[in-house]
Image (tube, rainbow, N blue to C red):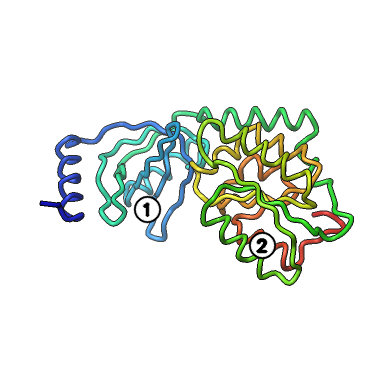
Amino acid sequence: MPLEASVLLDQVAALLEERFPAPRWITGEIAAATRSKKGHWHLQLLDGPVVLTVVVLEPHATLVHQAFRHAGLQLAPGLTVHALGTPRLYPARAQVELHATDLRPAGLGRHQRAREAARDLLAREGLLDAQRRRGLPRPPRTIGIVAPDGAGLADLLTLLARSPARYQVQVVRHPGEGPTAPERIAAAISLAARTADLIVLARGGGAAITRPYDTLTVARAVATCPVPIITALGHATDQSLTDQVAWRAVPTPSAAAALLDHGVSFTDGP
């Protein structure tokens, strides 16, 4: 007889508690860190393609915050931490979370170190502000959209279709994830630049899924593109390396549509 979903989740929760009766140390690189109005910390820890949600409740959250501040550190993306906690199932989203009582710094994560090295290289090559020096001689007639399929692309297309400017829109789709994603995104940018006056590089949000845009491959493709590029990568906090080299950077695909529709300057550049 089929199990009800709630019964299945109850059984999974019971198995987790049985398998992990005591706290364990877990290591990962912070991808996102927010503190709620009640003072709780909510972190996203990355380990390769895996994302683990870590929750630190009060009063432990305050003690952790004070300890990191005393060490001259912030709970921020790029920092690798050790978290002491117990994995538990969050039934509302059928998601495993680590309920932590202690966090300790372990240094910069591999991704952050690679990101800083890439940024230094782009700076030496004079590419960090190459896009921002570009201007458009006239309002764009053709908008190239480089994006994977998903809600972000759908929202952007819907909003552009309502624009009084009536842009001609050309979409170049690409896989948004996987080990070859950076190379495919770079190739899609090159393809879009052949016919577009302006490119919107769009993606729905999330630290793990926007990671390909935080690579030297994509950042260099944006910086060297002869067409101005607006990045709209679905996040409102930490900027990716690609955002830093773009002509304009906005937090979401919807914000890119609003920028095109309400006052971006096409004659003087940003």
Residue drawn at 77 percent across, 62 percent down:
264
Residue furthest right as drawn: 137
Using a 10 Å C-alpha cutoff, classify the residue at mark 1 as few (fewer than 14 neighbours), some (14 to 19) or many (20 or more): some
The numbered disc on residue 262 is none
Using a 10 Å C-alpha cutoff, classify the residue at mark 2 as few (fewer than 14 neighbours), some (14 to 19) or many (20 or more): many
Give residue 243's quadrant in the image: top right
Residue drawn at 25 percent across, 53 percent down:
91
Residue beneath label 1, please?
40
Q: Nearer the viewer, residue 182 or 238?
A: 182
Check whether the beta carbons of the residues at disc 2 and disc 1 lie within 8 A of each other: no
Above or below residue 65? Residue 256 is below
Q: Amino acid at mark 2?
A: Ala
Residue furthest left as drawn: 1
**In the visual, does 28 lie left or right of 178?**
left
Residue 16: where, in percent of width, then height?
20, 40
Secondary element under disc 2, as helix, strand or loop, is helix
Residue beneath label 2, please?
257
Disc 2 to disc 1, C-alpha distance? 34 Å
Above or below residue 254? Residue 16 is above
Residue 198: where, in percent of width, then height?
76, 52
Quadrant (top left/top right/bottom left/bottom right) for the C terminus:
bottom right
**In the visual, does 195 lie left or right of 219?**
right
**In the visual, does 227 lie left or right of 148?**
right
Above or below residue 168? Residue 246 is above
Q: Nearer the viewer, residue 177 or 48?
A: 177
Residue drawn at 65 percent across, 32 percent down:
216
Residue 30: where, in percent of width, then height?
46, 39
Q: Amino acid at mark 1?
A: His
Secondary element under disc 1, as helix, strand or loop, is loop
Q: Quick one: label 2 or label 1, which is nearer the N terminus?
A: 1
Residue 32: where, in percent of width, then height?
48, 45
